[in-house]
Amino acid sequence: MKIVVLVKEVPDTYGDRKLALETGLADRTGDRVLDEICERALEAAITLGEKAGDTEVVVVSMAGEAAQATVRKGLAMGAASAVQIVDDKLVGADVSLTAQVLAAAVKRIGFDLVVAGNQSTDGSGGVVPAMVAELLDVPQLTALNTLEVDGGTVSGERAIDGGTARVSAALPAVVSITERMPDPRLPSFKGIMAAKKKPFETLSLADLDVDADAAAQPWSIMVAVAEKPPRAAGVKITDSGDAGEQLAKFLVDNRLA
Ligand SMILES: Cc1cc2nc3c(=O)[nH]c(=O)nc-3n(C[C@H](O)[C@H](O)[C@H](O)COP(=O)(O)OP(=O)(O)OC[C@H]3O[C@@H](n4cnc5c(N)ncnc54)[C@H](O)[C@@H]3O)c2cc1C
C-alpha cells in the first residue's frame, strides 16, 4: 500500500504569529515547525503501515525552499521519502492553487490513500483535503478521529451531533484526521540519521504541468491588511444608583444594543 501524507510548515504556534503588512501573507520569518495536525496525520499513516506491512509512506509538501529541514522531520519520524514542491510563483498561493499543486504531485507519485490534517493552524481553511479528493476524483472521509484500513477499504469514526458516525470508503481515497488521533512519535536519533539518506525530491510547477498564472486561476487575493489596533482600556461604571441607566446608555452609544 502507498500512503501519501500532506504536510505543511507553519509559523510556530507558541510564537507571536502575525501577517506581514506589506504582503498580507503570514509572516514566515520567525520560527517555523511542521504543523502538529500533519504530524498526527503522519503518525496515523506510519501506524497503519506498521500494522498492514508492505507499506510505503511518502510525505508531500508545497512550501518555500527554506522548509526543507521541516519536511525532513517527516522522514525522521518514519516516512520512506519526501516530495517538496518549490516554485516562486507559489508565493501567496490560495487554497485552490494549493489543492491543484498537491493533487498533481499525488497523481505523479501514485497512491492508495492520502492522509491530511483537517485544518492547518495558520491558514485554517479546512478545505484543501476535500479539494484534493475532488481533483483526484476519489472519495474522501473527513475529520476522522480513528483510522483503519482493511483490504481495499478505509474506515474510521467521526464525531457528529450527539454521537459518533462510522464511515468507510473504497481505496483509493483521501482522508483528513483531527486532533483526537494519537500523539505523534518523536523522531529517534536513528531516525534522524536515517532521514539524511532517504530520497528527497524537489519539484517545480513545470514538473507538475500546473499553470500558476493568476489569469488562469480562480485566486482569492488579499486587497488590504492593517495592524490590529491596540486594545483600549474598558469603561468602568460606578454605581451611584444609576448603574443600569449608565450601562444602557453605554450599550446604545456603542451600538451594542
Ligand atoms: C512560499 C509560500 C508561501 C505561502 N504563504 C502562505 C501564507 O502566508 N498564508 C497561507 O495561508 N498560505 C500560504 N501559502 C499557501 C499554503 O500552501 C496554504 O497551505 C494553502 O493556501 C492552504 O491553506 P490552509 O492552510 O488554510 O489549508 P487547510 O485546508 O486548512 O489545510 C488542511 C490540510 O491540508 C494539507 N495542506 C494544506 N496546505 C498544504 C501545503 N502547502 N502542503 C502540504 N499539505 C498542505 C495539510 O495536511 C493540512 O493539515 C504559501 C505557499 C507557499 C509555497
Image (tube, rainbow, N blue to C red):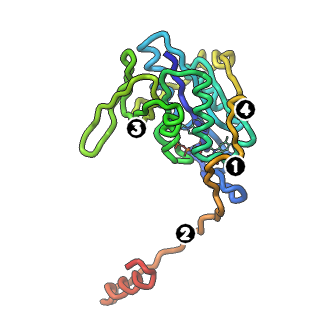
Q: Using a 10 Å C-alpha cutoff, classify the residue at mark 4 as few (fewer than 14 neighbours), some (14 to 19) or many (20 or more).
A: some
Query: Looking at the image, is mark 1 or mark 3 nearer the viewer?
Result: 1
Instruction: Give the Cα separation between the discs numbered 4 and 1.
Output: 17 Å
Residue in front for this viewpoint, 16 or 127:
127
Does label 3 or label 2 sit earlier along the sequence? 3
Circle 2: element type: loop
What residue is pinned by disc 1? 214
Query: Which residue is at a point 37% across and 33% down the rendered structure image?
Result: 145
Q: Secondary structure at mark 1?
A: helix
Q: Tag 3 or tag 1, which sits nearer the N-term?
A: 3
Mark 2 is surrounded, within 10 Å at the Cα level, by few (under 14), some (14 to 19) or many (20 or more) other residues, namely few
Report the residue at 61% width, 31% height from top. 104
Query: Distance between the Cα atoms at labels 2 and 1?
Result: 37 Å
**Furthest residue toward top:** 54
The residue labelled by disc 3 is 143
| Ligand number 1: quarter of image | top right
Q: Which mark is in front, 3 or 4?
A: 4
Between tags 2 and 4, which lies in front?
4
Mark closer to the chain start, 4 or 1: 4
Which residue is disc 4 drawn over? 204
Residue name at image x 58 percent, y 26 percent: 107
User: Is tag 2's residue or tag 1's residue first in the polypeptide sequence?
Assistant: 1
Question: Which residue bears the numbered disc 2?
Answer: 231
Position above or below: 107 against 94: above
Q: Secondary structure at mark 4?
A: loop
**At which x and y percent is residue 102?**
60, 34
- x and y, in percent, of residue 212 in the image: 69, 42
The kind of residue on which mark 3 rests is Ala
Q: Residues within 10 Å of mark 1 (few under 14, many from 20)?
A: few
Q: Is residue 64 above or below residue 45?
A: below
Labels 2 and 4: the sequence-earlier one: 4
